[in-house]
Image (cartoon, grey):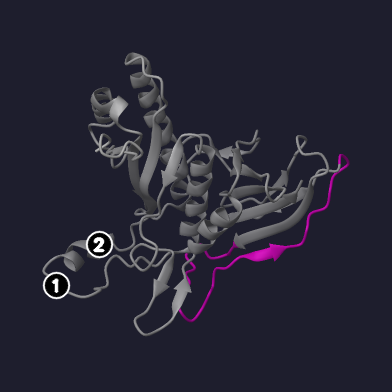
Amino acid sequence: MKQIDPTIELVLCGSSNTEMPTFPEWENTALTAAYNSVDYISLHQYFGNRDGDTANFLAKSDEMDRFIRTVIATCDFVKAERRAKKDMMLSFDEWNVWFHSEAENDDTMRNRPWQEAPHLLEDRYTFEDALLVGLLLITLLKHSDRVKIACMAQLVNVIAPIMAEENGPAWRQTIFYPLLHASKYGRGTAMTPVLSSPKHDTKDFTDVTDVDSVAVWNEASGEVTVFAVNRSLADDVALTVDLRSFPGARLLEHIRLANGDLKAENSASAQNVSPETVSLAETDEAGLPRILLQKCSWNVLRFSV
């Protein structure tokens, strides 16, 4: 294929989740054979709250982080072993929250030949799902030096941020908003912050930071955007943002997605979960903005620099 068109980029199929018994042996074996012929290796994983444990659910972005780090380490090992020159990039081909419709999956998909636009896998997302989507977006931005492709694979109706009814309205699910904000403001150079945060443990994870965050510098617009999720179920967190590398930075806007009901959903008739603009923060003695991150909230902080 590359002899015909040397400009094409090839993706080697990687593991579908971290629980596969062949992970990461598959990555090592396949890359050893194909390293010089491909440009990316793929990852794929969905996340769910099947046991109803919200604290553990909101820590699953840490699982995505470990997944990415393990694949990067495997790629770099094969690069060293093969004395290769290029870095292997990652393509997170599919990611999202998906579990609400799994119980009906088999019945929905079976014995339904030749239907036109059947209703398949139409998860109705809750507010806590939106929080995890925000955390997953932060994780992808943190690794954007190596994760060059990342796809929320379905955008309308099927495990999707947008719902559309036949001959009726289209409407925004809860998970629409973090994706919108990341797409609109997450353009530029990602900067991993030096973050100090309280921590907690969950059933499957230890040392989970209450706050996870990433910053993006858009040189063209002259803005730095900080994305932050407070995933504590109990406590608001006072956030101090130190942008010492950007003297004169000024907070332009604080957008917050929050809801007292973690199970709140949106529908065609009611947008129960939607973002709000928060009053701008006061500054401390050093002139740094003091920002309150409400418990269980997605936050977008836009700074002019």
Going 23% across and 62% down the picture, which residue do you hit?
A: 105
Quarter of the image that includes the N terminus: top left
Element carrying mark 1: loop
Which of these two is toward me, 45 or 12?
A: 12
The outermost residue toward the right is 285
- Residue 24 visible in rendering: no
Q: Mostly what secondary structure, the magenta segment?
A: loop
Element carrying mark 2: helix
Question: Which mark, residue 266?
Answer: none
Q: Is residue 253 above or below residue 112?
A: above
The magenta segment:
258-286
Residue behind mark 1: 114
Relative side of 276 to 90, left or right: right
Name the N-terminal-most of marks 2 and 1: 2
Q: Picture coordinates of residue 12 (x, y %)?
A: 28, 36
Going 64% across and 60% down the picture, which residue do you hit?
A: 256
Q: Is residue 55 above or below residue 148?
A: below
Residue behind mark 2: 103
Residue 66 colored in magenta in the image: no
Q: Amino acid at mark 2?
A: Ala
